[in-house]
Image (cartoon, rainbow, N blue to C red):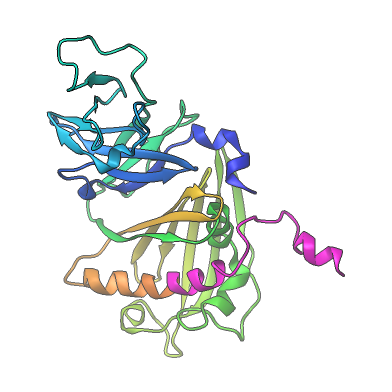
Amino acid sequence: MIVSKQPVLKKFWYPVMPLSHLKDRPLPFTLLGENIVLWKQEDGSVACIKDRCCHRTAKLSLGFLEEGNVVCGYHGWTFDAAGVCVKIPQQPEQAVPQKARVPAYKTQVKYDYVWVALEEPLNDIPDFLEAGLPGFRQVHQFYETWNIGALRLMENSFDSAHVAFVHRGTFGDVQRPQVGTREMLERPFGFVSRQSAEVKVRGDLAQKAVQTGDGTTTRRTESEWFMPFIRRSSIHYPHGLIHVLITCATPMSDDKSMILQWVYRNDTEADVSTAEVIAFDRAITFEDKLILESCEADVPLSIVDGAMSETG
């Protein structure tokens, strides 16, 4: 699937950056091929409009903020959160033309991230059970660009067959490539997958969850896909640890995605440090990144890629 050929994808919410990144200047982002600019207004809310001045097409993200509005760095035309030009400094006595405006987009702040929808969204931002739940902490893990199509990451997130090989350096075991049974439950705009598997986990952090002497443990996993490109995966260990991964692939273009991940855990910093939590999951995602960036952006719907099947 190529995202630029799917207009419906504009009708969903996407996390585009941590709220902490927005401080005292406008910041650019590319969402589904659309250049947008975001900034924090004086009341703390976030604005998002097209990153293109309607005067001489300069990028507004190269400008600055003034009284909660964004000022174009080329000629000083000033735009509010609705994309309306409210000031042309060269003509202070004249009314601003009504057509002097740029498209504006819906924004929300949730889970400490800024979310944007380019068109009227078909559904709400997902609600994650563990967010704000007593006994759980939130750990922000990473926010970075991967050279992959967004659907590649979602497919990989629910693909149990790759674990033994891609993750042979962390928790996979090439001697046990078989995939266990999976329970599937369809939901509006997604599905839930439940599975139990014995894994071999390596590393100081992981060993704290290992119960057996041979370095293996059983993980009970419930993964939910929120269309189009959000995955929640709740991993339960025998001794009571719950590790919930929230992974988002925000499509920037056909072959580039911003990958955001954070976790919820029912332990404390004294049990396992934030640095250790990040380090272990980082090792796993680096294994995925290496393989996924070697794949083509378009995800085939058949087991064998179409080009390969044509050549026999």
Residue drawn at 36 percent across, 84 percent down: 203
Residue 209 position in % (x across, y down): 35, 76
The one of 248 and 116 positioned closer to us in this rendering: 116
Quadrant assignment, res 270: bottom left
Residue drawn at 36 percent across, 63 percent down: 243
Q: Is residue 97 above or below residue 192?
A: above
Residue 293: within the magenta?
yes
Which contiguous range is marked in magenta? 285-312
Indicate the quadrant containing the C terminus: top left, top right, bottom left or bottom right: bottom right
Q: Is residue 205 left or right of residue 251?
A: left
The one of 271 and 287 positioned closer to us in this rendering: 287
Q: Is residue 297 above or below residue 284?
A: above
Specify the farthest residue to the bottom: 214
Residue 252 position in % (x across, y down): 47, 48
The number of numbered discs placed on residues in the rendered structure image is 0
Residue drawn at 58 percent across, 70 percent down: 294
Residue 143: within the magenta?
no
Q: Tell me, yes or no, if residue 118 can be seen here.
A: yes
Residue drawn at 50 percent across, 70 percent down: 288
Residue 191 position in % (x across, y down): 56, 46
Residue 122 position in % (x across, y down): 50, 29
Q: Is residue 68 left or right of residue 124?
A: left
Q: Is residue 48 left or right of residue 256?
A: left
Q: Is residue 56 left or right of residue 256?
A: left
Q: Is residue 109 above or below residue 82?
A: below
Specify the farthest residue to the front: 90
Q: Tell me, yes or no, if residue 246 can be seen here.
A: no
